[in-house]
Image (cartoon, rainbow, N blue to C red):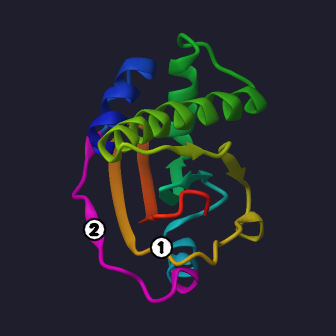
Amino acid sequence: MFEDTIIGLTEQVAGITLKSKEKIPVAARKSLNRQKKVIIKEHIDFSTQCVTVIKTKGVFHSFILCWMDQDLFDALTTGMNRNRKLEYGKQVFYMMEYYNIICGRVLSKINNMMASTSRLTVPQVIHSQKELEIPKDDYRQHVRWDFDSDYGGLHVETYYDLRKNKNK
């Protein structure tokens, strides 16, 4: 569901073809904090990648960490702006909108399947490891999607849990 949404929407709004790598489902983690630090240390280079965090609140409770190579960030935002290059501040706005649309579509499908309501937070662009607030919540599930394109990679780490009390 998430994978198809990312591939289809990226093609639709920016004309960029993403190729999915193997989805990596991961069993429950004992320590999300420890795992997040490993991901950041081993996979994210803040000098060459654009990093964004989005959360959902409600019955579907999640922490979504997205990062993409700088060349893909440039191509995606240029494509969304009808192939006109944007200044960095506007690029960030376009990228946040891109993630809002993708996550909103997936969350709507989840809400419909669960007959419940969950909401997205505003995406946050993270410029350094120090800015990344690692949640202390106990998420029980974890999945990662990796995509390649002619411009570089897009990576999505999702930590989630289904909660009976939708206010958490």
Q: Quadrant of the N terminus?
A: top left
The quarter of the displayed image where residue 36 is located: bottom right
Q: Is residue 122 positioned above or below 53 on the image?
A: above
Q: Which residue is mark 1?
A: 139
Q: Is residue 23 magenta?
A: yes
Q: Position of residue 162 (x, y in %)?
A: 42, 63
Q: Quadrant of the C terminus?
A: bottom right
Q: Is residue 87 positioned above or below 168 on the image?
A: above
Q: Which residue is mark 2?
A: 25
Q: Residue at x 52, y 80 (%)?
A: 32
- Disc 2 to disc 1, C-alpha distance: 14 Å
Mark 2 and mark 1 lie on one chain; the one further toward the N terminus is: 2
Near mark 1 (Cα within 10 A), the count class, few <14, some 14-19 or many ≥20, is: many
75 with respect to 105 (left or right): right
Q: Position of residue 62 (x, y in %)?
A: 51, 59
Q: Residue at x 57, y 21 (%)?
A: 78
Which residue range is magenta in the image?
19-34
Give the secondary structure at mark 2: strand
Q: Is residue 61 positioned above or below 30 on the image?
A: above
24 with respect to 136 (left or right): left
Near mark 2 (Cα within 10 A), the count class, few <14, some 14-19 or many ≥20, is: few
Q: Is residue 88 positioned above or below 146 on the image?
A: above
Give the secondary structure at mark 1: loop
